[in-house]
Image: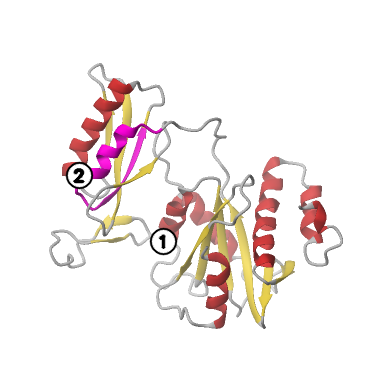
Amino acid sequence: MIRSWQGDSELEPLYHRLQARKTRRGFLDSFAEALVALHARRCGCSIQVEVPTPSGKTCDLLLERNGVSLFVHVKRLGSRKPTTKRMQISSRLRILEQIEKPWVVKVRWQESLDDEAMQAFVIAAASFIETARLGDEKVVRDANGVELGGVKIVAPQEERRVALVIGLPSGFVDESPRIDRLLHRAHKQFMPKESNLILVCTPHLQGVGDVESALLGTYVERWDEHPAKGKRVAHGRSKDAFWCNNQMQDSQLAGWFWLAPMHHEYQGKLWMREGYDALTPVAQLAQDIFSK
């Protein structure tokens, strides 16, 4: 497919960039841009690559459709280590999803657990979830002190039952600080007085939560706010996010997508900053392309 871009006035520059890359890291960086460009082309956009800015930097892509322009900055979160095999998920974990608590819960466990050890892990995890608060974390061990896994309360939710998120066997990794650095790098490449969109891609689906936390803040207990009706504690976002308060006011649009070369469909999510008019032509364009 990429070879077919030869001779294409818009996509040929991306073809040559991919051909010139000598390292895996550089190739994947360019491949992420190529996937975004291909997706935008399929959505009816014309494309310009590496558009210079007045500051001497470049925007990765300029998308245009029906007279509406959007400058897109693609950043890739590299994997800390390659995934060599698919994790086996025990049906016993379904028990945790029956707990009537309004939490998003991240769980991890050692891949070597047999059925008896997994049952012990689930029982301990369930007991913890019943009494835990937002942000609490527990390492579960057996009678000999050997670690079985861990549980962490990561966010509130509207549903009254637990929603599970699978973590890494070696521990929970918060990628928000790394993503925050990518967001700031992208911001330095903005085209002044134009509509700019930052897209961060991750090698795993769970990355969508890390991007959201970097943009909006992690969930915390907020003692400076009144709890919702029927709640004892107010929950909100931390104040250290990319879009916190009056920071980065020229950044109004951001998104995430899954960098999975073996899949052919774009899978992503779009965020608009609070107060941004979602009915403007550029907002409609961004939603049409990147909220799928």
State the residue in front, 188 or 115: 115
Q: Where is residue 31 shown, x and y percent of the image?
A: 69, 51
Q: Circle 2 sits on which residue? A: 132
Q: Where is residue 59 shown, x and y percent of the image?
A: 67, 66
Seen as rendered, the residue at the extreme right is 7
Q: CA distance from mark 2 to mark 1?
A: 25 Å
Give the residue type at disc 2: Ala
Query: Disc count in the image?
Result: 2
Q: Where is residue 50 shown, x and y percent of the image?
A: 73, 65
| Residue 83, above or below 178 | above
Quadrant in the picture for residue 75: bottom right
Quadrant in the picture for residue 8: bottom right
Residue at horizontal 35%, vertical 55%?
218
Q: Could you say which disc has been placed on residue 139 in the image?
A: none
Asked if the stretch drawn in magenta spans residue 20, the answer is no
Asked if the stretch drawn in magenta spans residue 95, the answer is yes
Question: Is 212 on the left or on the right of 12, as rendered?
Answer: left
Residue at horizontal 21%, vertical 65%?
224
Residue at horizontal 76%, vertical 57%?
14
Q: What segment is highlighted magenta in the picture?
A: 89-108
Q: Where is residue 114 shown, x and y percent of the image?
A: 34, 20
Q: Circle 1 sits on which residue? A: 241
Q: Is residue 60 visible?
A: no
Q: Is residue 15 visible?
A: yes
